[in-house]
Image (cartoon, helix red, strand yellow):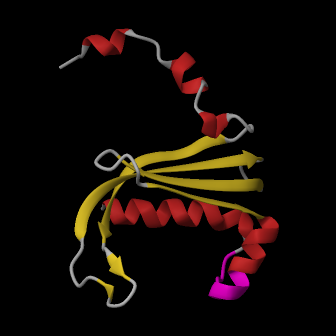
Amino acid sequence: SASFLDAFDFTAIEEMDPSLAEGHRVVYDREVPFELRVQDADIGPQEVGTLEAIRCKILALGDEQCPRHCRIELTSENDLFFHYTHSVDEHGFRDMQEQQKLMIDFPDYVSVVIKMLNSCIK
């Protein structure tokens, strides 16, 4: 069933998105099921978490095959204070790659994260 909102053009509102202000473009924007667990500093994470739909937005700056910068934003409709941002360029990725023993290079990072998020949806 069509909504009356389908008749409106929201491109002007979408262009005001502060995430796009620095020239980034959205390469992924979907809700992905995450299991969230509360973590107590003394006890550690709780045994069973809650399943929540988290909006995952991936933005890239530069060439699609070799981006200069990547930003991942995680937000929740259920909790307006849930807002996590991961921002990395090639230099920062090298540090992360070394610390976490990642086997991919920066140009592949966005596509690998997208594949992982899509597999979480499936």
- Tag count in the figure? 0
Relative vertical location of residue 24 with respect to residue 36 in this rendering, above or below: above
Residue at (23% x, 17% y) in the render: 2
The segment highlighted magenta reads 97-104
Asked whether, in this view, residue 33 is left or right of residue 116, the answer is left
Quarter occupied by the C terminus: bottom left
Residue at (70% x, 34% y) in the render: 21
Residue at (43% x, 62% y) in the render: 117
Farthest residue, direction front: 42
Q: Which of 23 and 42 lies nearest the eye of the viewer?
A: 42
Q: Quadrant of residue 12?
A: top right
Magenta highlight on residue 40: no
Quarter occupied by the N terminus: top left
Residue 29 x, y percent position in the rendering:
47, 45
Residue 108 x, y percent position in the rendering:
67, 65
Residue 81 x, y percent position in the rendering:
41, 51
Q: Quadrant of residue 106?
A: bottom right
Residue 24 x, y percent position in the rendering:
69, 41
Q: Which of 30 and 54 lies nearest the eye of the viewer?
A: 54
